[in-house]
Image (cartoon, helix red, strand yellow):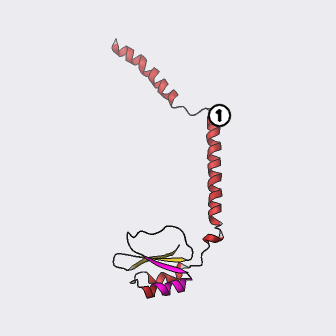
């Protein structure tokens, strides 16, 4: 008897489970699509704004001119020469785990070194 009751209940539970998995109502679905479209448009506008950087973010620094430093020991004279070569107005040598300010400065050359004071990368900002 118990088995026959379970056999009757299983299909009912299956139908209830399928009903719970049904998608959102059409109005809710339209609202979700509209929200997704608005989010995509906002993201596109932000991306466009990022590409059209204001003059405050314009850079006079060209880090590619200092790529020759990578793999060499960093010293004040080499850093100053790299500053001149890149057109930067200032230069800083960044050591591992050193606290640094994160504001963007397009006129600053950053020379990153490892724990042995060997240049690992150069970048503007």
Quadrant placement of the N terminus: top left
Q: Position of residue 98 (x, y in %)?
A: 39, 70
Foreground pick, 63 / 18: 63
Please give the name of the residue rendered at 38% of the width and 18% of the height, measured from the top-left corner.
Answer: 6
Residue 66 rendering spot, x and y as whole percentages: 50, 82
x, y percent for residue 121: 45, 76
In the picture provided, is 27 more to the left or to the right than 100? right
* Closer to us: 92 or 118: 92
Q: Nearer the viewer, residue 117 or 19?
A: 117
Q: Based on the displayed image, in which of its 4 quarters is residue 115 positioned?
A: bottom left
The residues colored magenta run 79-95
Query: From the viewer's perspective, is 108 left or right of 58?
Result: left
| Furthest residue toward top | 1
Q: Quadrant of residue 87?
A: bottom right
* Residue at 64% from the left image edge and 56% from the top image edge: 44
Give the vertical position of 15 relative to 52 (above or below): above
Left or right relative to 40: residue 20: left
Residue in the image at 51% along x and 83% along y: 83
Instruction: Find disc 1 in the rendering and name its residue.
Output: 27
The number of callouts visible is: 1
Name the residue rendered at 61%, 70% in the picture. 57
* Residue 27 % position (x, y): 65, 34
75 shown above or below 33: below
Vertical placement of residue 46 versus 15, above or below: below
Q: In the image, is residue 87 part of the stretch drawn in magenta?
A: yes
- How dense is the environment of label 1, judged by Cα within 10 Å: few (below 14), some, or many (20 and up)? few
For the residue labelled by badge 1, is the local secondary structure a helix, a strand or a loop? helix
């Amino acid at each position: 008897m118990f088995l026959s009751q379970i056999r009757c209940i299983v299909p009912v539970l299956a139908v209830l489970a399928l009903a719970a998995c049904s998608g959102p109502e059409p109005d809710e679905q339209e609202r979700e699509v509209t929200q997704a479209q608005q989010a995509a448009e906002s993201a596109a506008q932000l991306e466009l704004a990022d590409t059209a950087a204001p003059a405050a973010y314009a850079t006079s620094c060209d880090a590619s001119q200092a790529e020759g430093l990578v793999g060499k020991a960093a010293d004040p004279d080499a850093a100053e020469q790299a500053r001149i070569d890149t057109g930067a107005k200032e230069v800083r040598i960044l050591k591992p785990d050193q606290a640094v300010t994160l504001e963007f400065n397009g006129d600053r050359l950053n020379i990153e070194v490892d724990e042995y004071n060997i240049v690992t990368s150069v970048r503007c900002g």
